[in-house]
Image (cartoon, rainbow, N blue to C red):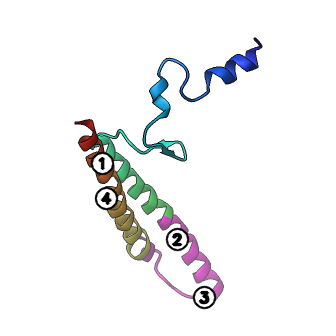
Amino acid sequence: MSRDAAFSHSTQPGRGANPGASRGSGSFLGFPLEGFGFLTSLLLAASSGFFTFFLVTALSIFGLLIWNQILHHTVNYANSYLYFGFPAAVAVWTIALLVFGTLWVRAKIHAK
């Protein structure tokens, strides 16, 4: 058996040391949708909110830079934190806490 055939044979779902590992709730973009603990769920929700805050704030600062330079306005750059970054982060925190909280509760119910 060639090396390539052995590699493809060992990576097939349902084969190997743990045949039940491929079964379950699945994944989204390689991210498992089940099996998070309470602290892991909180950490994932917090990190997604912080990532959103910094990304939206950076994009809105660049947007205000273009707005101020091209159209000769004088909008304060601090508005990007208050009116863009913070509301986006709160929205993502709310959605993430609902999603990860639901996954955590489902895992607790199915574990019993």
- N-term-proximal mark, 1 vs 4: 1
- N-term-proximal mark, 2 vs 1: 1
Mark 1, residue position: 42
**Decide: marks 1, 4 in contact (CB < 8 A)?**
no
User: Could you say whether the residue bearing mark 4 is in a helix, strand or loop?
Assistant: helix
| Label 2 CA crowd tier, 10 Å (few <14, some 14–19, many 20+) | many
- In the picture shown, does residue 70 fall above or below 49? below
Nearer to us of marks 3 and 1 is 1
| Label 4 CA crowd tier, 10 Å (few <14, some 14–19, many 20+) | few
**Decide: marks 3, 1 in contact (CB < 8 A)?**
no
List x then y, in percent, for residue 56. Answer: 49, 66
Q: CA distance from mark 3 to mark 1?
A: 43 Å
Residue closer to the observer: 92 or 60? 92
- In the picture shown, does residue 71 fall above or below 28? below
User: Could you say whether the residue bearing mark 2 is in a helix, strand or loop?
Assistant: helix
User: Could you say whether the residue bearing mark 3 is in a helix, strand or loop?
Assistant: loop
List x then y, in percent, for residue 93. Answer: 34, 60
Identify the residue at image location x=37%, y=48%: 44
- N-term-proximal mark, 2 vs 3: 2
Q: CA distance from mark 4 to mark 3?
A: 42 Å
Mark 2, residue position: 61
Mark 3, residue position: 72
Mark 4, residue position: 98
Residue closer to the observer: 103 or 21? 21
Decide if residue 102 is on the left or right side of residue 28: left
List x then y, in percent, for residue 106. Answer: 29, 47
Decide if residue 6 is on the left or right side of residue 75: right
The segment highlighted magenta reads 56-81
Badge 3 amino acid: His
Decide if residue 22 is on the left or right side of residue 95: right
Q: How many marks?
A: 4
Q: CA distance from mark 1 to mark 4?
A: 11 Å
